[in-house]
Image (cartoon, helix red, strand yellow):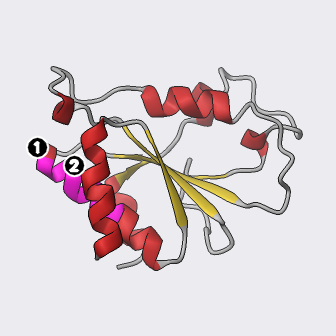
Amino acid sequence: MSLASLLDFLEPINLAEISNDEGFKDTQIGKHILVHEDELPDISDADLVIVGCGEMRGMGMQYTNTSAPNKVRAQFYKLYYWHTEVSIADLGNIKIGASLHDSYAAVRMVVSELLQMGKKVLILGGSHDITTPQYAAYGS
């Protein structure tokens, strides 16, 4: 499996929405993150890869998806960019599956592939049960 094969599991980021159509200043993290907006970025030099997950069904919620990952991004991207030696990539949000188990499989596959590439992975959002497929990715 390759990064391109994960495209089926990922939704791109709308930077205009995240920045409220204001963009980001050169001093903000959002200006320096490699973002999956129109196409997947080259993450070969990325030290940290961010993926979002809005899956909430495992918590017993009626709705399946939240905007929590993008709300976290909106605040994170505004932070001051002072670790210039750290490269960050954001691959967007993992698509919500038809069933909860489909979402678990998608999380496990995405995290597993990124770990095999030697990347540190940060997952934004999702209910606590998302830690199980994330943990399973470390075992594969």
* Residue 3 can be seen in this image: no
Task: Kindly identify which residue carries mark 2.
Answer: 103
Span colored in magenta: 101-110
Decide: marks 2, 1 in contact (CB < 8 A)? Answer: yes
Q: What residue type is labelled 2?
A: Ser
Q: Is residue 55 left or right of residue 5?
A: left
Quadrant of the image containing the N terminus: bottom left
Q: State yes or no: residue 4 in magenta.
A: no
Main secondary-structure element of the magenta-colored stretch: helix
Residue 66, position in %: x, y? Answer: 35, 26
Residue 75, position in %: x, y? Answer: 65, 27
* Residue 46 can be seen in this image: yes
Q: State the residue at coordinates (85%, 34%).
A: 25
Q: In this view, does 75 lie to the left or right of 64?
A: right
Where disc 1 sits, the SS reads loop
Q: Which amino acid does label 1 sit on?
A: Ser
Q: Mark 2 and mark 1: span between their CA atoms? A: 7 Å
Task: Kindly identify which residue carries mark 1.
Answer: 99
In terms of image quadrants, where is residue 140? bottom left
Q: State the residue at coordinates (41%, 26%).
A: 67
The answer to whether 19 is drawn above or below residue 52 in the figure is: above
The answer to whether 49 is drawn above or below residue 137 in the figure is: above
